[in-house]
Each structure stands twice: as C-alpha cells, then as structure tokens.
Image (tube, rainbow, N blue to C red):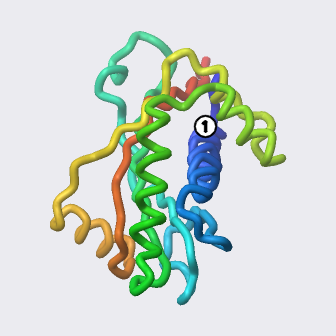
Amino acid sequence: MTHALALATATATLVQLLQDSLAQADLPGAAVASRPANPPAGWLGLNLILFNVTPDPALRNAPSAALAFNLHYLVTAHGDAQAGEPERLLAAALLALSAHPVLHPSRIAAAKAARPDLQAATLDAQAAPIRLTAEPQTLQDLSAIWSMLKLDFALSTRWTVGPIVIEAERLV
C-alpha cells in the first residue's frame, strides 16, 4: 500500500535520475537540488521544483480507497550562461527524462535505498505505472509559475509525473 511518503519518494527518484544524467553534460561539479527557491549565485546544476499536485483525471473516480495524483515539476538549469552551461544541463535533463517515460520500480527502490527517511515508502510496489510527460509551456505559463514561486528567470521545462496512488485509510 502506497502511503504518505509517496510524493517525497517520487521527488527523490527524479532527483537521482537527473543526477545520473549530469555525466552527459560533462560539467564537473554540477549537482541536482530540489528546493522551491532560487539557488545561490554561481551555483551549477539543475533544480527540481514540485509546484503543483492535481487529481489524476483517469483515476479520480475509481471505486476504491485510493487517491491518485499527478505531480507537476519545474526543472530549471543554472550555470554560466556565457559558457552555455544551462543549455547543456537542460539538454541532459531532457534526454534523461525522455529516455525514462515510466519510472521503473527498481529505480524507485534505488532512490529509497539512498534515503533512510524513505525506507518505509512503498511507491515501488504501486501497480499503476508512473509516467513522465513533458508539458507544453508558454512564456505566460512559465512567467506565472516563476512569479508565484518568486523565482528569477532560468532556462526551464515542465514535467508531469503520475499517477501517484495513495491508499486512503478508511475511518470507521
């Protein structure tokens, strides 16, 4: 049964997937963070921001105690613009996310193994496949997200991950 650690486990799995992708960018010292804020000045890497959680339309009325959600992420790339670092980082992220259109349970289990706080998570046992989908974006969409999160402009892309199914406890 998937429970309250599901969202954190999904984010940790994406962070690890993106971290693995950095070798393609060939930028030593690049890192992946998951923070809802601007990274420090001069930071080199990708920032994964969970900015919205919505009900999964296909599973929202399923007759069960499960709640199904889609997680909406913004991936931003940071580095020396003159050296093309943000473009190289974002390209590596796009390649990695596109190459893994479904989060495989073994990848989720590996992310759990690296995080002691997620050991009790059961997302890797979820029956429904967890899909990664690139989201179309307009400058207006991105401006609204950056404004809402109080982020400075950064080269970015949006992705939806889901469904994440959380079993609801039945109250008697």
Q: Count the marks: how many?
A: 1
Residue 9 percent across, percent down from the top left = 64, 42
- Packing grade of label 1 (10 A; few <14, some 14-19, many >=20) is many
Residue 43 to residue 70: above or below: below
Residue 146 percent across, percent down from the top left = 32, 72
Quarter in which the N terminus is drawn: top right
Residue 52 percent across, percent down from the top left = 39, 52
**For mark 1, what is the residue?**
6
Residue 13 to residue 80: above or below: above
Compared across the picture, whether 172 is left or right of 118 comes to left
Residue 48 to residue 147: above or below: above
Compared across the picture, whether 75 is left or right of 171 comes to left
> Which residue is depicted at the point 57% across and 62% down?
34
Residue lying at the far right of the rendered structure: 116
> Which residue is depicted at the point 36% across and 41% down?
54
> Which residue is depicted at the point 78% across and 34% down?
120
Residue 27 to residue 133: above or below: below
> Which residue is depicted at the point 16% across and 66% down?
140
Quarter in which the C terminus is drawn: top right
For this rendering, which residue is in front, 122 or 34?
Answer: 34
Residue 28 percent across, percent down from the top left = 66, 71
Secondary structure under tag 1 reads helix
Residue lying at the far top of the rendered structure: 63
**As shown in the figure, which amino acid type bears the numbered disc 1?**
Ala
Compared across the picture, whether 44 is left or right of 49 comes to right
For this rendering, which residue is in front, 35 or 134?
Answer: 134
Name which quarter of the figure residue 109 lies in.
Answer: top right
For this rendering, which residue is in front, 139 or 29?
Answer: 29
